[in-house]
Amino acid sequence: MAWNPSDSVGPALSGRADLRGALHRLRQATGLPLAFAGLVEPGPGQLRISELQGNRTTALQGLAVYSGNGLGGKTVALARPCRVTDYSVSRQISHEYDAAVAAEGIRSVLAVPVVVRRQVRGVLYGALRAAQPLGDRTVGAALEAARDMEQALVVRDEARNLLTATRAPEGDSAGAWEEVREAHGALRALAPRIDDQELRAELLRVCGRLAGVTGGERTGPDSAARVALTPRETDVLACVATGATNTVAADRLGLRPETVKAYLRSAMRKLGAHTRWEAVVAARRAGLLP
């Protein structure tokens, strides 16, 4: 059975690290002492609170919030920010979660949606333990944190799609392997854009394992297998392997064309290659590229 690289990164693609970062930015930008968040789970619009910062109890941890219920559920249903000045007596929301909210001492609370491609994927909350109005500046700052989270989820979605495309195909279909190689190159280009170090490391590990499974025609102690390319040299070769020009590779990798050319020359020298394609072939034989 062919190794499936996407099997190894399920937890890394959950987005919890991005939630923690978004909550940290929300608290810094708004000055709110308490922040918590959750992602919408598959199914009937259920949000589960998974991250809390500044909390005094565990009353909200793991709380399941359904679309339309409470402040967060209203935010999921409407896909827009919602806020109340005194949660326990507000007539703007339903009160299924009053016990958990009261246990944490929450009075004023703001909820902003994390929307990706018109779908609510999560909710960020900021709260006070006093009944004070939360103004538009606070809402704006919270929305900025939500937008950062949205971009992080877009990148994760892209990574998930690419990992699906890197399933090692059964047999030796040239077309199937080309799709894998395209996805491998895209993953190499995507990884540097990811702030989450754990996820970035997982994606690069997948790339390395995929290259080892699909390439690896190592032919002796003096073969190119002993060559150690730098991460950026490998990134450039992965782009070149898909037929990308230096200009296209530079755009994908966020580099200058001259920098791409320099990395390519260095990789060619290490691999003993005289042309771009010779370098790609040598790297594949060394198990450095799929």
Image (cartoon, rainbow, N blue to C red):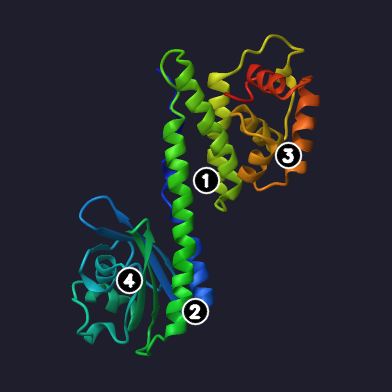
**Would residue 125 be found to the left or right of residue 33 on screen?**
left
Which is in the foreground here, disc 4 or disc 1?
A: 4
Q: CA distance from mark 1 to mark 3?
A: 25 Å
Which is in the foreground here, disc 1 or disc 3?
A: 3
Mark 2 element type: helix
User: Mark 3 or mark 2, which has the lower sequence index?
Assistant: 2
**Would residue 266 be found to the left or right of residue 152 on screen?**
right
Q: CA distance from mark 2 to mark 4?
A: 18 Å
Q: Label 4 near label 2: C-beta < 8 Å?
A: no
* Residue picked out by circle 4: 80
Which is in the foreground here, disc 4 or disc 3?
A: 3
* Residue picked out by circle 3: 260
Label 2 amino acid?
A: Thr
Mark 1 element type: helix
Q: Position of residue 72 (x, y in %)?
A: 29, 70
* Residue picked out by circle 2: 30
133 w.r.t. 138: above or below: below
Q: CA distance from mark 4 to mark 3?
A: 43 Å
Q: Label 2 near label 3: C-beta < 8 Å?
A: no
Q: Residues within 10 Å of mark 1 (few under 14, many from 20)?
A: many
- Please give the label number shown on residue 87: none
Quarter the C terminus occupies: top right
